[in-house]
Amino acid sequence: MRPVGIRVLLVDDQPIVRTGFRTVLTAAGGIDVVAEAGDGPAAVAAVASYRPDVVLMDVRMPGGDGLTATERITAEHPDTRVLVVTTFDVDDYVRRALRGGASGFVLKDTDPENLVRAVRTVHAGESLLAPSVTTRLVRDWVAQEPASPAPSGPPEGLTAREHDVLVLVARGLSNAEIAAEMVVAESTVKTHVAHLLRKLDRRDRVQLVVHAFERGLVPTRPT
């Protein structure tokens, strides 16, 4: 029996786009497109029926937008990760997607290799974008809203080491860069990140960045 791959739901109002994405993902191996949907409400229903690991979600669809669907899916199915299709030229969409629990973003005209990498990265619970890009998006969003006062010590039951890792994640450093900064093994950093996800009840690295900026753990503007 063939091993089960990453289960993906494709959501886009244009059938030709879904067909293109299906072709690319299926050809890559290890990814199974289990269903398609043409609008937000259909996506919500498909997630309930097929329980995909990753949803590739378009934003603007006549039958129901993808951002509302993202909010419902992440609230009702926390184990399903949503990868939002965006052009990064509409900041309001990016902010709302982050608020709604999106795990990352991918350009609609991205190269096939990048699309496959994006699905696999989000499925693994890691940051989809280059960490610096994710951090910039979150900084721009949070800077428009009041930030909580920076705590004087490690918050929410975190150890001092976990707090330091969280701040470095929010600053845009990769695991390897954090390991070099803290002079520890990369495997140790991965362990700290896993503890942060569990303690803070966050589904992936992108949400850790959001959490850190919302709590005022890092400045919202470069110093």
Image (cartoon, rainbow, N blue to C red):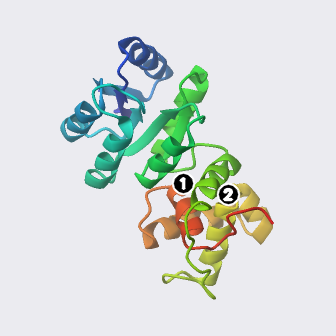
Picture layout, residue 110 above or below residue 86: above
Viewer-nearest residue: 133 or 49: 133
Corner quadrant of residue 146: bottom right
Q: Position of residue 94 (x, y in %)?
A: 52, 44
- Left/right placement of residue 13 relative to residue 138 reads left
Residue 90, can we see it? yes
Which residue is identified by label 2? 175
- Left/right placement of residue 126 relative to residue 172 reads left
Q: Position of residue 171 (x, y in %)?
A: 70, 61
Where disc 1 sits, the SS reads helix
Residue sticking out furthest to the bottom: 152
Check the picture and name the quadrant holding the N terminus. Answer: top left
Picture layout, residue 174 above or below residue 84: below
Type of amino acid at the residue the image marks with label 1: Val
Where disc 2 sits, the SS reads helix
Kindly identify the residue that appears in the image at 20 percent across and 36 percent down: 45
Numbered badge on residue 147:
none
Which residue is identified by label 1? 206
Picture layout, residue 202 above or below residue 118: below
